[in-house]
Image (cartoon, rainbow, N blue to C red):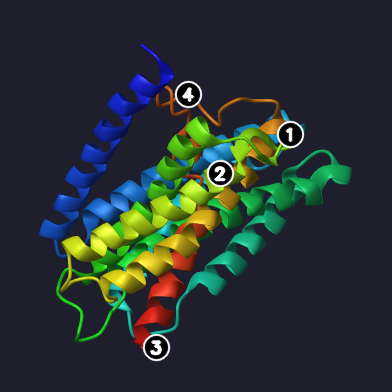
Amino acid sequence: MSELKTRLVVGPLVVALVAGLMVLDASLRIHLGLGAILALLVAAAMAEFYGMAQGMGHRPFRKLGIFMGTILTAIQWWWLQTHRDTPDPTSALLVAALTVCFLRLRWRPQPERRIEDAAFTLMGLFYVWLPLSFALRLRMEDWGWKAGPLAGHAALAFAVAAGKGSDIGAYFVGSRLGRHLLAPAVSPRKTWEGLGGAVLGGAAFGWAVAAAWPDALPVAPLQAGILGALLGPLGQLADLGESLLKRQAGVKDSGALLPALGGILDLMDSLILVLPCAYYGLLLFQRVA
């Protein structure tokens, strides 16, 4: 089976699995589906990130980092449901993670590499946990009285659709029309034409979600299309960032969990920048509307 056919088979299966868990999330008041999905994704993605860091010759606190990412996800999931009107705990959680890393340095036998090890451990939290945690914010944000009861679902669906739509647009336009390389030193297959496809894909998929849920998403379809177009290049920038990590680690894929798609980071790399920017973009568009 060709890579494209495998992608066309595996991709919908992944979407169906996530959609099923989101239906479970919608049926439970405690949003258990989303919390479980995110905890698993964070743990798997951080394991892949630390694996690439080790491939570069570094020695992050792998188990500690994965544990902290999972625990921080659980804490934020609980906090956003029980203390929604209080200040966001993200800064305090990151300071706590920094403290734990400094305490862990005492048991690392190579003094000259201790700070480097702690830095790469914390980078896993900043690169994986922090951006993906915005999925919880998109889902649990109070989008105001004008938004429907499914506003959180629609906001999260919009962000994921815009991010993956940019991937789809970039892949199909770039593979067929790509002629001018975007960043040959980082990714030899990224083209400027593909970047244009990412803009179109992000706009089309973002508009489609708003059109499908006109009374749920906190912005109108036109605004969703414009925001989706802006998110498209950000998704490709995040993709290039992961390509740089893989190139330095000397690997083709971040993992081998998904046939033809690679690892969890390969599947979600565009969302690293899209989720946070979609959250703040929706807030901004909602206020100026």
For the residues labelled 4 and 1, the Cα–Cα distance comes to: 18 Å
Q: What residue type is labelled 1?
A: Gln
- Lower position in the chain sequence, tag 3 or tag 1: 1
Q: Is residue 31 visible?
A: yes
Quick one: label 2 or label 1, which is nearer the N terminus? 2
Mark before the other along the chain sequence, 4 or 3: 4
Q: Which amino acid does label 4 sit on?
A: Ala
Q: Name the residue under label 2.
A: 193
Q: How crowded is mark 2: few (under 14 residues within 10 Å), some or many (20 or more)?
A: many
Q: Answer yes or no: do the residues labelled 4 and 3 have beta carbons within 8 Å?
A: no
Residue pointed to by mark 3: 288
User: In the structure shown, which secondary structural element does the residue marked by tag 4 occupy?
Assistant: loop
Q: How far apart are marks 2 and 3 (CA)?
A: 32 Å
| Dot placed on the residue nearer the N-terminal end, 4 or 2 | 2
Secondary structure type for disc 2: helix
Q: What residue would you read off at disc 1?
A: 248
212 and 123: which is toward the camera: 212
Residue 187 falls left or right of residue 77: right
The residues bearing labels 4 and 3 have C-alpha atoms spaced at a distance of 44 Å
Total labels: the figure holds 4
Could you tell me if the residues under marks 2 and 1 are in contact, i.e. CB atoms within 8 Å? no
Classify the position of the N terminus by image quarter: top left
Disc number for residue 69: none
| Of labels 2 and 3, the one closer to you | 2
Q: Position of residue 66 (x, y in %)?
A: 52, 44
Q: Do the residues labelled 4 and 2 touch (CB within 8 Å)?
A: no
